[in-house]
Image: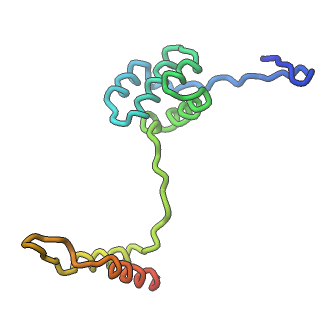
Amino acid sequence: MIHFRLNGLIREVEMSAAIGLREDFEAADLRGLAAKVKDANQARRLLALAAVYDGMDREEAARIGGMDRQTLRDWVYRFNEQGSEGLINAKPPGRPSKLSAEQKEELRQLVEAAPIRRSMGSCAGAAWTCSAFLRTAARLICRK
């Protein structure tokens, strides 16, 4: 329990207990994974969690991982739920496609069937101009 004074009043704040880490890993396991993964952010997070497994204060462990204690706590939740793969930044899904699967397939076939333009004896790519492509795509979207 922590006591602090705020505007002349004594307040009591109860500190929440640290969230435990899953028991199927050890510090050495996480350090080994950190050495093998290709994602640098995932490696930092693994090393911070390894420090927690070693009994280091969470504030210090967070500093090792280049984050604050609250962020470490968030990664502990993800690690407990998803393992080391949960320590990778997930890409946001983005805006859904305006084309249906059938429209995408039709557009793909149109692009692939376009005649090849030749210039100076080499293949210069499909004979689509930007405006022709956009007109075709717009026609497909409007049919939706």
Q: Residue furthest left?
A: 121
Give how far across and how far down residue 128 sits, in percent: 26, 78
Eyeballing the image, is 104 above or below 15? below
Side of 2 relative to 52 (left or right): right
* Residue at x 49% of width, y 14% of height: 54
Side of 2 relative to 58 (left or right): right
Residue in front for this viewpoint, 49 or 80:
49
Give how far across and how far down residue 80 sits, in percent: 52, 33
Give how far across and how far down residue 74 sits, in percent: 58, 34
Give how far across and how far down residue 62 sits, in percent: 54, 24
Q: Residue furthest top?
A: 55
Quadrant for residue 119, please give it: bottom left
Quadrant for residue 140, please give it: bottom left
Q: Quadrant of the N terminus?
A: top right
**Colour scheme shown:** rainbow
* Residue at x 44% of width, y 39% of height: 88
Please count the marks in the image: 0
* Residue at x 54% of width, y 14% of height: 56
Q: Residue furthest right?
A: 8
Side of 68 relative to 91 (left or right): right
Quadrant for residue 77, please give it: top right
* Residue at x 43% of width, y 74% of height: 99
Eyeballing the image, is 120 above or below 35? below
